[in-house]
Amino acid sequence: MTEKTSLWGGRFAGGPADALARLSVSVQFDWRLAPYDIAGSRAHARVLAAAGLLDPDELGQMLAALDDLEAACASGQFRPTIDDEDVHTALERGLLERLGALGGKLRAGRSRNDQVATDLRLYMRDHARGVAVALVELADALTEQAALNVNTPAPGLTHVQHAQPVSFGHWLLAHVQPLLRDLDRMRDWDTRTAISPLGSGALAGSSLPLDPAAVAKELGFNAPAANSMDAVADRDFVAEFLFITSLIGVHLSRLGEEVVLWTSTEFGWVELDDAFATGSSIMPQKKNADIAELARGKSGRLIGGLVTVLTMLKGLPLTYDRDMQEDKEPVFDAIETLELLLPALAGMVSTMTVRVDRLTAAAPVGYSLATEVADWLVRKGVPFRDAHEITGKLVALCSVRECELEDLTDDDLEKVSEHLDPSVRSVLSVESALAGRTTPGSTGPGPVADQLAQVQHHLDTWRQWAVEKVVPR
Ligand code: ARG
């Protein structure tokens, strides 16, 4: 290659200033779009041939060159250079190197504006499935640990204070439910994103007899865009995707924070496998939950990406503006962050040891059975308001005496309220508290087993969706 390939320049007297070229270049990150750009080129070549703008022989050569270029990109034999402004420029250079002048025919009826919007949709739909696979794997790891701990009691917390006993399996499933919603959001987003911008050209469509519906179909989209101006200006699919990845980040950060607590000396509920924990360079005894902390920390960059794109889009006039080149790095970063983080979290969760003994011991601590007493009084006909008051007095007495509710004497009970009698002790066990939770969605063994079966069923459905191929070769 002797002469530099540029997709514009006819009307310019000289080349761009270095400072402009350095600012403008995006190929160092948008090269990730190359396979999708080539898929779009194949579809576009077929449509040009159907319109009589390429003869069958030219189409054959064009498709062969695109195949060859695709293989060369995949093997690394063809690489972008810093003189290639963006992925589209680099690939046109690759095509010209293979086809000479014929390579210049492919750009007819197409603009980088509809191309980049198409490429990004294809890339994101494809990679959303990779993120979904990794989300399902983390959900699987949590679900497997939950299955082992349906009958492990734990002190459920509100305000990080002991509240009521729960099943630790239920608790772990409470981290799976948000991930199921994330998967649902991803599929919902995917349906809205399955719209093809190709055929919109720079903004106004094309005077050439193109066939946007055929292109859409070939690229696995559900339909071509309804409005060419919207098609090149719209980045809702980017903002929406980054909201989903931000929310995933928030969910992972909450799980991460809990693992940090659970593995602390103060809690001691969970021990991490050595392979998924880190040490300290100075303190030989340390075993740190760095994966959990990185999960907590990386939510920041995921949210940052969403804010970047929303701020970039706000007030942008229709249609394409170069500002929109800033849409891609947050997307790549979000996907690559989750592709790194999710497998590490899944490994950490699936190999962690739940200290059933410590959780069982902690479950009744802090008067977590007080609500059972109040409910017992309610069943005897005492208004809850009074039951709450009476139970509060029992707790106050225990806290003065530094004893547990079951340590109070029959006499103590009678003194606190005429409604109390020794049979109240029957509700003062974690086991009975859990067994009594039988309503759907609650933390008793029955409803938790039902929930577990439901979660496993949903995950099977998501597993199938996540491996569905959307971008045809
Ligand atoms: N590299 C650009 C982007 O990522 C696409 C090219 C459109 N550029 C243009 N000057 N019309 O948004």
Image: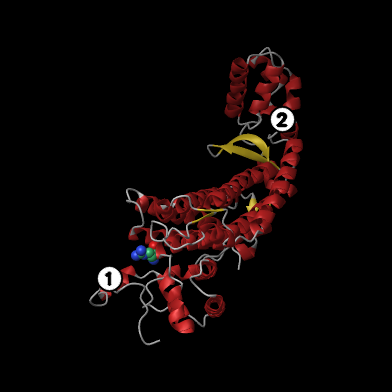
Compared across the picture, whether 465 is left or right of 449 comes to left
Q: Are marks 1 and 2 in contact (CB under 8 Å)?
A: no
Compared across the picture, whether 218 is left or right of 166 comes to left
Q: Quadrant of residue 402?
A: top right
Q: What kind of residue is marked 2?
A: Thr
| 14, above or below 351, in the image | below
Q: Is there any visible trace of residue 355 in the rendered image?
A: no
- Helix, strand or loop for disc 2: loop
Q: Residue at x 36, y 57 (%)?
A: 320
* Quarter of the rendered image showing ligand 1: bottom left
Which residue lies most toward the front here? 52
Q: Position of residue 239 (x, y in %)?
A: 45, 51
Q: Position of residue 174 (x, y in %)?
A: 63, 43
Q: Quadrant of residue 467?
A: bottom right
Q: Quadrant of residue 173?
A: top right
Q: Position of residue 202 (x, y in %)?
A: 38, 60
Q: Residue at x 24, y 77 (%)?
A: 14
Question: Mark 1 near ligand 1 (CB under 8 Å)?
Answer: no
Mark 1 or 2: in front is: 1
- For label 2, the residue is 439
- The image quadrant where one finds the N terminus is bottom left
- For label 1, the residue is 20
Q: What kind of residue is marked 1?
A: Leu
Q: Which tag, 1 or 2, sits closer to the chain's start?
A: 1
Q: Nearer the viewer, residue 45 or 177?
A: 45
- Helix, strand or loop for disc 1: helix
